[in-house]
Structures are given as C-alpha cells and as structure tokens.
Amino acid sequence: MNNQQRESIRQRILTRINEIEGLLSATREDVDLDDESANLEQKIASAVDSQVIENEKRELTRLKNNLPWVESEDAGYCQRCEREIPFARLMAVPTTRLCVACAQ
C-alpha cells in the first residue's frame, strides 16, 4: 500500500468515526404519550434504537482500533494469510484486517 492509499484509508476511518460519534451524541426526543398503542410503538422503537446504538459502538471501537494498524508497516496485509488486501476492500470495509478469502 502506498502512502496516498494509506492516507485515503485513514481519512475514510476518521470520517466514519466522526459520523458515528455524531449519531451517538444525537438524542432521541422523548414524548409523553397517553395513547397505549403509541406507547407500545415508542417501546419497540426504543428497543430497535438500543440495538442500533450497540452496533454503532462496536463499529466505532473497531475503527479506532484500526487507525494504528493503518499507520503501521503491517497495513494492507491480511492478518491470517499475509497476502495484500485490495485497496478497494479496505476503503469499503475500513474495519477489516482480513482479505476476502480469510474473512469467509
């Protein structure tokens, strides 16, 4: 991986980190509802939101953990087979450290 590709991936990771942090800092507006069906809908939406938030937090952790790797000499090489990971894959899945074959 050349320096320009390394910088592109690093910027992709930083952009995604900022996006996720922005989403996590946004708060859902609580509404006091008297309608039982509206309350049930709110509870279901809250459960879904909780799962989405957990997924975003996991991705955020993986992104932050990948920043030092991208800046290291090992960047761009699969951790299992040590073959080069295509640049397009690293841009599409900036949290990966595995080639397609090893990821399957």
Image: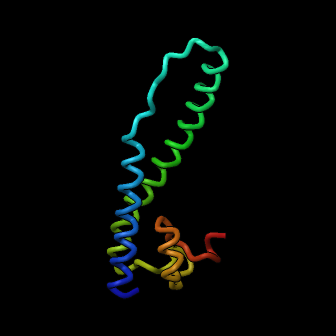
Looking at the figure, which quarter contains the N terminus?
bottom left
Vertical order, 26 against 58 (above or below): above
Vertical order, 102 against 25 (above or below): below
* Residue 51, x across and y down, in percent: 56, 40
* Residue 21, x across and y down, in percent: 37, 49
Q: Residue at x 38, y 57 (%)?
A: 17
Q: Nearer the viewer, residue 41 or 91?
A: 41
Q: Which of the 4 image quadrants contains residue 104?
A: bottom right
Q: How many marks?
A: 0
Vertical order, 5 against 24 (above or below): below
Q: Residue at x 48, y 81 (%)?
A: 87
* Residue 20, x across and y down, in percent: 41, 51
* Residue 76, x across and y down, in percent: 45, 80
Left or right: 92 as drawn, with respect to 12: right
Q: Residue at x 59, y 32 (%)?
A: 45
Vertical order, 12 against 7 (above or below): above
Q: Nearer the viewer, residue 97 or 33?
A: 33
- Residue furthest top in the image: 34
Q: Residue at x 49, y 42 (%)?
A: 53
Q: Nearer the viewer, residue 8 or 101?
A: 8
Q: According to the image, what is the colour scheme of the structure?
A: rainbow
